[in-house]
Image (cartoon, rainbow, N blue to C red):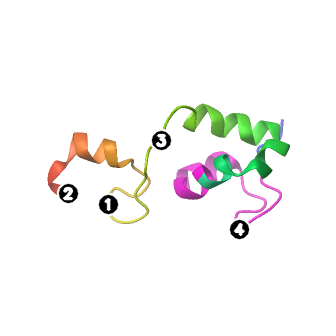
Amino acid sequence: MSLILEFGKYKNLNIEDVYNKDINYAQWLYRNTLTKQYDDIYNFLDNKFKNKNLIYLSFGKYKNKSIDWVLENDKNYI
């Protein structure tokens, strides 16, 4: 089982580390059909994103949190 990316800007990093560092990139990978060639990576991402159409912040103190999460936890931030 290999969860190491062999391509892209996070080449040679573990997908779980990429998910924690840049959730928007992980979400892009999940939507990109290229990752379906990499079953282990796709399955990891599928468990994280399946049936979830969430939008994640890519900035600020809530970076990598979904807008839904921010609304539930800090409405004033939105």
Mark 4 lies on residue: 9
Q: Position of residue 51 (x, y in %)?
A: 53, 31
Tell which circle, 3 or 4, labels the residue nearer the N-terminal end.
Answer: 4
14 versus 7 height, above or below:
above
- Residue at disc 4, secondary structure: loop
Instruction: Say if mark 2 contacts mark 1, CB within 8 Å.
Output: yes
Q: Residue at x 53, y 53 (%)?
A: 23
Amino acid residing under circle 4:
Lys
Residue 6 falls left or right of residue 20: right
Q: Position of residue 18 (x, y in %)?
A: 62, 54
Mark 2 lies on residue: 77
Query: Which quadrant of the rendered structure holds the N terminus?
Result: top right
Q: Residue at x 28, y 47 (%)?
A: 70
Tell which circle, 1 or 4, labels the residue nearer the N-terminal end.
Answer: 4
Tell which circle, 1 or 3, labels the residue nearer the N-terminal end.
Answer: 3
9 versus 34 height, above or below:
below
- Give how far apart the Cα atoms at labels 2 and 4 are: 30 Å
Mark 3 lies on residue: 53
Residue 33: mark in rendering: none
Mark 3 surroundings within 10 Å by alpha-carbon count, few (fewer than 14), some (14 through 19), many (20 or more) = few
Which stretch did the figure color magenta? 4-27
Query: Which quadrant of the rendered structure holds the C terminus?
Result: bottom left
**Residue 64 seen by the camera:** yes
Q: Nearer the viewer, residue 44 or 28?
A: 28
Mark 2 surroundings within 10 Å by alpha-carbon count, few (fewer than 14), some (14 through 19), many (20 or more) = few
Q: Residue at x 54, y 50 (%)?
A: 20
Quadrant of the rendered structure where residue 69 is? Answer: top left
Residue 26 falls left or right of residue 43: left
Amino acid residing under circle 1:
Lys
